[in-house]
Amino acid sequence: MTPADLTRRARRLSWLTVAYNVAEGVISLLLGLAAGSAALVGFALDSFVESLSGGVMVWRFSPREMSEEQTERVERRAGRLVGWTFLILGMYVLYESLAKLLTREAPQPSLGGIALAAISLVVMPWLARAKRRVGEELGSPALVGDSKETLACAWLSVALLLGLGLNALWGLWWADPAVGLVIVFFLLREGIELAWSEEPVGGCSSCHGDWVAATVGGGAVLERG
């Protein structure tokens, strides 16, 4: 696949991320309000944050002609923006998890919520793998970082499924917030790494010296110099 093809694929995957997460967020919010489920409402907010991250990637791979220095600057800025979405999501999940543990709030049974979480367990890992593969081939730490956030959202789907399922079947109200606290560690660690890094992150800092910007087929791409 040429650099131009990879860039277009990165842009399409980013648009798909935005579209899916907006739809997922709206559906999850409606189901959460109907069932009085804080877990589903939190899942909806997670979806909206992930759509924000996808939007950053749409901006990152939008058609433009850039020098090598500009490419590095945009890549670093995009990585930091993705990092801040990690931190926002992590703090929210931390708050929700602790609040539910303290108040012993149990999510209400929701077959729609369980189905939505199951669908996300299929879609999110596929999106994460596709974006990571394209990001590594392009030498884009920001897209690799965004793929990690998509994978984190898949784990949040696991948490939602466990929380709703175990509570519905056996009344284990604490399952959802307990799993949420485990995910918080991953979110905050990755967010700090991305948001405060002075170099292009994701283990690809050396690849930027080998790429220069070019416009091929109407899109901004990275091409070996």
Image (tube, helix red, strand yellow):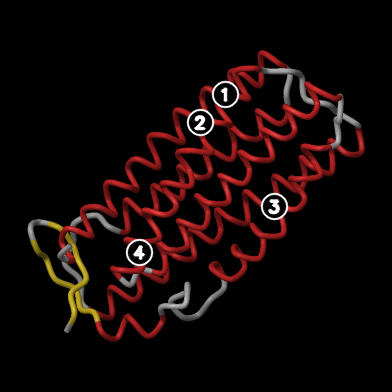
Disc 4 and disc 3: Cα gap in Å? Answer: 23 Å
Q: Specify the amino acid type for callout 1.
A: Ala
> Which residue is pictured at 56% across the width and 31% down the height?
118
- Which of labels 1 and 3 is toward the front? 1
Q: Residues within 10 Å of mark 4 (few under 14, many from 20)?
A: many
Say the numbered circle drawn on residue 160: none
Element type where label 3 sits in the image: helix
Disc 4 and disc 1: Cα gap in Å? Answer: 30 Å
Quarter-wise, where is residue 142 in the image? bottom left
Quarter-wise, where is residue 109 in the image? top right
| Lower sequence index among marks 3 and 2 | 2
Say the numbered circle drawn on residue 135: 4
Residue that badge 2 annotates: 119
Disc 4 and disc 2: Cα gap in Å? Answer: 24 Å
Q: Do residues under tags 4 and 3 come within 8 Å of each other at their CB atoms?
A: no
Q: Position of residue 199 (x, y in %)?
A: 46, 80
Residue lying furthest top: 34
Query: Which image quarter is the N terminus in?
Result: bottom left
Q: Do residues under tags 2 and 1 come within 8 Å of each other at their CB atoms?
A: yes
> Which residue is pictured at 46% across the width and 50% down the height?
53
Disc 1 and disc 3: Cα gap in Å? Answer: 21 Å
Say the numbered circle drawn on residue 183: 3
Q: Specify the amino acid type for callout 3.
A: Ile
> Which residue is pictured at 24% across the width and 79% down the height?
211
Q: Specify the amino acid type for callout 4.
A: Gly
Say the numbered circle drawn on residue 115: 1
| Above or below: residue 162 compared with residue 62 | above
| Above or below: residue 154 compared with residue 166 | below
